[in-house]
Image (cartoon, rainbow, N blue to C red):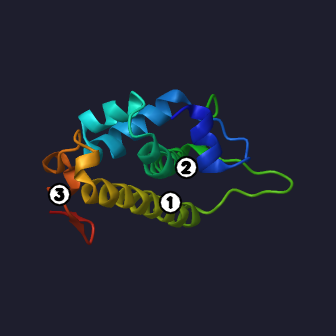
């Protein structure tokens, strides 16, 4: 997914710039541990275009948004960490940012879950996928505790 595609999918026309490293980091942190290295490589090579467009890119865009939200709420510069405030806008409260970020993460997880259901429901179409490598089959989080 290109940075421009991620920006458009995650933020619409809000004028947010997404860097290539943000997309790659989200892919490494959230997508690859679930789909596996081999399937991610196949997707990068152009195989399974329908899976990529319908399932993986939307999930990846939401994970990019989730990861970028703290840096959009505050900026680091010569003056330290600052938040934006202006004539028409005030910075959101930390609680509001946290709730919105949780909702974005939940949406991203739901989209990735849909991709996994599709892949596992049609295993013969995705021979690169190994369900034993899916971190979600080995780890569960209940009440904030990793099991």
For the point 73% across and 41% down, which residue is it? 15
| Farthest residue, direction bottom | 143
Dividing the image into 4 quarters, which one contains the C terminus? bottom left
Which of these two is toward me, 96 or 16?
Answer: 16
Q: Does residue 65 appear to the left or right of 134 in the view shown? A: right
Residue under numbered circle 1: 104
Residue 146 in view of the camera: yes
Callouts 1 and 2 close, C-beta under 8 Å: yes
Numbered disc 3: secondary structure = helix
**Where 56 sits versus 102, above or below?**
above
**Where 146 sits versus 1, above or below?**
below
Question: How far across and how far down the image is residue 55, in percent?
Answer: 44, 52
**Where 81 sits versus 116, above or below?**
above
Q: Which of the two discs, 2 and 3, labels the residue nearer the N terminus?
A: 2
- State the CA–CA distance, disc 3 to disc 1: 22 Å
Residue 80 in view of the camera: no
Numbered disc 1: secondary structure = helix
- State the CA–CA distance, disc 1 to disc 2: 10 Å
Numbered disc 2: secondary structure = helix
Residue under numbered circle 3: 137
Point out the frontmost of discs 2 and 3: 3
For the point 64% across and 33% down, which residue is it? 79
Residue 140's disc is none
Q: Residues within 10 Å of mark 3 (few under 14, many from 20)?
A: few
Q: Quadrant of residue 36?
A: top left
For the point 22% across and 56% down, which residue is it? 136
Question: How far across and how far down the image is residue 14, in percent?
Answer: 73, 47
Which of these two is toward me, 125 or 120?
Answer: 125
Q: Quadrant of residue 2?
A: top right
Question: How far across and how far down the image is residue 61, in percent?
Answer: 52, 46
């Amino acid at each position: 997914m290109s940075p421009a595609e991620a920006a458009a999918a995650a933020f619409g026309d809000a004028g947010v710039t997404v860097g290539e490293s943000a997309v790659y980091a989200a892919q490494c942190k959230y997508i690859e541990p679930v789909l596996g290295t081999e399937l991610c490589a196949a997707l990068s090579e152009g195989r399974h275009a329908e899976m990529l467009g319908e399932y993986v890119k939307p999930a990846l865009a939401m994970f990019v948004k989730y990861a970028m939200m703290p840096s959009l709420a505050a900026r680091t510069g010569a003056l330290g960490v600052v938040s934006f405030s202006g004539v028409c806008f005030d910075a959101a409260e930390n609680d509001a940012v946290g709730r919105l970020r949780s909702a974005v993460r939940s949406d991203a997880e739901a989209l990735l879950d849909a991709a996994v259901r599709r892949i596992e429901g049609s295993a013969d179409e995705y021979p690169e996928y190994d369900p034993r490598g899916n971190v979600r089959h080995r780890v569960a989080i209940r009440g904030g505790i990793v099991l």
